[in-house]
Amino acid sequence: MSSFIRPEIRDFDPYVPGLSVREIKRRFNLQEVIKLASNENPLGVSPLVQKAVCREVAGIFRYPRTHCPALVRALSERLDLPEEMIVPGNGSDEVIDMLMRVRARPGRDHVLGFENSFSMYKLTARLCGIEYRQAPRAKDYGLALDNLARAVDQDTALVFVASPDNPTGHAARAEDLAGLARGLPKGALLVVDEAYIDFAAPVSDYTLMPRMRDVDNVVLLRTFSKAFGLAGLRLGYGVMPAWLAEYVRRARIPFTVNRLAEAAGLAALEDVAFYTATLDVVSQGKQYLAAELERLGCEPTPSQSNFIMFRPPKRAEDVFQNLLEKGIIVRPLASFGLAERIRVNVGVERENRAFVAALEQVLA
Ligand SMILES: *Cc1c(COP(=O)(O)O)cnc(C)c1O
C-alpha cells in the first residue's frame, strides 16, 4: 500500500529527539540521571507559571480563543511592536511550518539554510514538498552570511538562519543580518530563528527586533521553550511584517495553541525574577563549563547560547555512550553532520559539576 503514500513521506527520516531521563534510568538501572541534551531551562518551571496553569485548568472544557489575543497584546507591549505583526504558534516549530506553507510553492521554490543546522527547517521543507538547499559554513562552523547571499536566486522563498545558532552557539551581528536581508531578491524572506537570543550578550548586538518596523522581508522566530521554561507546553511566536502575518493567520489551523499554553506564556512574561535567575545561572554555568572543557582538552566553541559545542579528544560517540552509562545525557552531533562533536547544555551548578566529573573519568 505504500505506493499510495506521498513520496516525500514514504522515505521521510523523522526528527530524532534527545533521550529521556526515564529511558536511561531504566536502561542502565540508575537512581539519578542528569539531562543536559535538549537545551531546556536549568531552573525548571517558574512557580508563577505553575499557579497560572492550575488556575486555567478549570476552563479547559472551552475552546481557546484563536490567535491568543491576550498573549499577543502582552508580547506587543513587551516588544514595542504592533499586535498585527505577532503570530503565536504551537512551538516555533509550528511557525516554521506555517511560513513554509504560506510562502514556498512546491516544485517551483526552494528554501535555504546552513549546513549542520537545526533539522526542523529541512524536515518541514521535505514534508511540504519543498527543496531544501544548504550553504557552507565558515571554517570554524561560523555563520558565513556571505555564503547564504551567494546561494540565493530568484526562486529562493525563505532563508533560515538560527542566531544564536544551534548547535554551534555562534551568533551573527544584527547589522550583518540586516545587510543580508537588504540584499535579498524581491519576495525572498529572511527567517532569523532567535530561540536562544535571551542568552546572547549583549542581546542588542544580535537581535533584529528593534529593526522590525523598518524591514519588509524579515521574520523573527521566538520560543518559550528555552529561557522561559515551557518546552513541554509548546509555545512560540513569529514576528513578521503585518501583510505576511495576515496571510499566516488566515491559513492557520485554528486552536493549535491551547489554553494552558497561553496562560503559561502570560505568566512567564510576568515572572521577571525567574527569567533573570535563568539568565544568571546560564551565564555563570557557561563560564564554568567552557573553562573546564578547555582544561580537559575538549576545544569548546565560544557560545552566545545556553549550551556549548565541544570536540572531545576521544571518539565523540564513545564519550557520549560512556557518559550515558554514568547517568549524564548529552547530545552527540552526528545527526547534525558533526560526528566529532558533542553539545552539552548548561544545568544548575550541581549538574554542571557532575557532568565535568564524569567527563574527566571518561577521558582519563
Ligand atoms: C529549541 C529550538 C527551537 C524551539 O522550538 P519550539 O518548537 O519553540 O520548542 C527553535 N529553533 C531552534 C534552533 C531550537 O534549537
Image: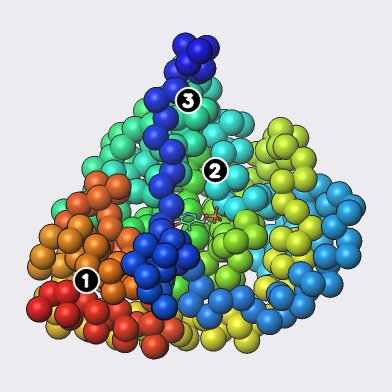
Q: Nearer the viewer, mark 3 or mark 2?
A: 3
Assign a secondary structure to mark 3: helix
Q: Is residue 266 visible?
A: no
Q: What amino acid type should be assigned to the residue bearing mark 3?
A: Ile
Q: What amino acid type should be assigned to the residue bearing mark 2?
A: Ile
Q: Residues within 10 Å of mark 1 (few under 14, many from 20)?
A: many
Front-lying residue, 118 or 158: 118
Q: Report how far apart the C-alphas of labels 2 and 1 lie in the structure.
A: 30 Å
Q: Are marks 3 and 2 in contact (CB under 8 Å)?
A: no
Q: Residues within 10 Å of mark 2 (few under 14, many from 20)?
A: many
Q: Is residue 255 above or below residue 58?
A: above
Mark nearer the N terminus (2 vs 1): 2
Question: Any atom of ligand 1 within 8 Å of the CB at mark 2?
Answer: yes
Residue 300 marker? 1
| Residue wearing tag 2 | 96
The colour mode here is: rainbow
* Residue located at (43% from left, 43% from top): 15
Front-lying residue, 184 or 135: 135
Assign a secondary structure to mark 1: loop
Residue 265 drawn at (x, y percent): 70, 66
Front-lying residue, 232 or 175: 232
| Residue wearing tag 3 | 9
Q: What amino acid type should be assigned to the residue bearing mark 1?
A: Pro
